[in-house]
């Protein structure tokens, strides 16, 4: 007699598998970095409007990097459980597993460069950064929204798994500083063709610098975390506005 389908058993197995992914994400710093790049690839795929083949290729490459990192984590955990002292064979196994992650990551980088950074798209970024011209205002609104969302995703991914950090407090980057400089950089593109562009950008940058200076008084932040936050806040809108907007010329 055929056994009935046990839905609870499959649901339990799925939950255990999901717990494994989350545990690896929380405990492994490299996993958090990989997931940040997965989020970036998802956004870039929508921005560039990749076709089905390009989306499939990028997804396979990025997923394979995460898969290799998880296998590497399993091998390291198993070896650490088996032996507590240094053993050359254990060292060999760990090195080979890490090498597999390296090869998969290099493969993903090469594929991403070939798809995203062709001369036409690089020229489009350059034209937007230099001229600040757009087809319509809705493009700027979309770029601003995507910049905020992407910055929040990156900051959250960098801080997840750190008990002393929240999205806007502590961690490797200053969230307040990142958002302040993101607003200032976005404002440059929004008011680029107005007569008050220099005054508006000056006030925005001054406010961002003030926020950064105030964050230095917070004991959870150091100079480098504030600098990292400022750099991230400038870089994200630069890329997003360049990708989501088109020059009018």
Image: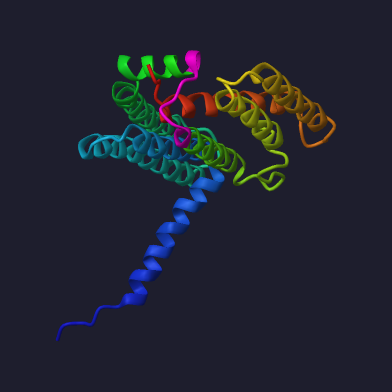
- Which residue is nearer to you in this view: 107 or 204? 204
Is residue 137 inside the magenta stretch? yes
Is residue 126 inside the magenta stretch? no
The spot of residue 39 in percent (x, y) is 44, 40
Question: Quadrant where the N terminus lies?
Answer: bottom left
The spot of residue 49 in percent (x, y) is 30, 35
Outermost residue, right side: 217
- Which residue is nearer to you in this view: 145 or 17? 145
Describe residue 154's horizontal placement relative to residue 88 as left or right. right
Rendered residue at 48%/27% (across/down) = 241
Task: Answer yes or no: is residue 118 visible.
Answer: no
**Splitting the image into 4 quarters, where does residue 69 fall?**
top left
- Which residue is nearer to you in this view: 38 or 141? 141
Rendered residue at 32%/76% (across/down) = 7
**Splitting the image into 4 quarters, where does residue 246 fall?**
top left
Q: Is residue 128 above or below residue 70?
A: above
Magenta span of residues: 129-139
């Amino acid at each position: 007699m055929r056994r009935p389908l046990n839905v609870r058993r499959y649901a339990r197995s799925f939950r255990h598998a999901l717990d494994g992914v989350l545990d690896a994400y929380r405990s492994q710093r490299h996993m958090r970095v990989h997931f940040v790049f997965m989020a970036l690839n998802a956004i870039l795929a929508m921005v560039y409007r990749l076709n089905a083949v390009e989306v499939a290729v990028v997804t396979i490459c990025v997923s394979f990097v995460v898969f290799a990192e998880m296998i590497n984590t399993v091998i390291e955990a198993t070896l650490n459980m088996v032996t507590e002292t240094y053993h050359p064979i254990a060292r060999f196994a760990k090195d080979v597993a890490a090498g597999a992650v390296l090869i998969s990551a290099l493969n993903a980088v090469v594929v991403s460069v070939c798809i995203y950074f062709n001369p036409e798209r690089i020229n489009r970024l350059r034209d937007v950064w230099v001229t600040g011209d757009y087809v319509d205002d809705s493009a700027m609104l979309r770029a601003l929204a995507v910049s905020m969302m992407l910055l929040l995703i990156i900051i959250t991914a960098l801080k997840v798994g750190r008990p002393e950090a929240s999205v806007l407090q502590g961690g490797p980057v200053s969230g307040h500083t990142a958002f302040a400089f993101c607003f200032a950089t976005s404002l440059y593109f929004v008011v680029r063709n107005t007569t008050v562009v220099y005054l508006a950008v000056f006030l925005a940058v001054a406010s961002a610098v003030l926020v950064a200076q105030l964050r230095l008084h917070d004991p959870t932040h150091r100079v480098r975390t504030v600098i990292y936050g400022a750099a991230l806040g400038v870089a994200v809108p630069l890329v997003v506005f360049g990708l989501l907007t088109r020059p009018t010329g």
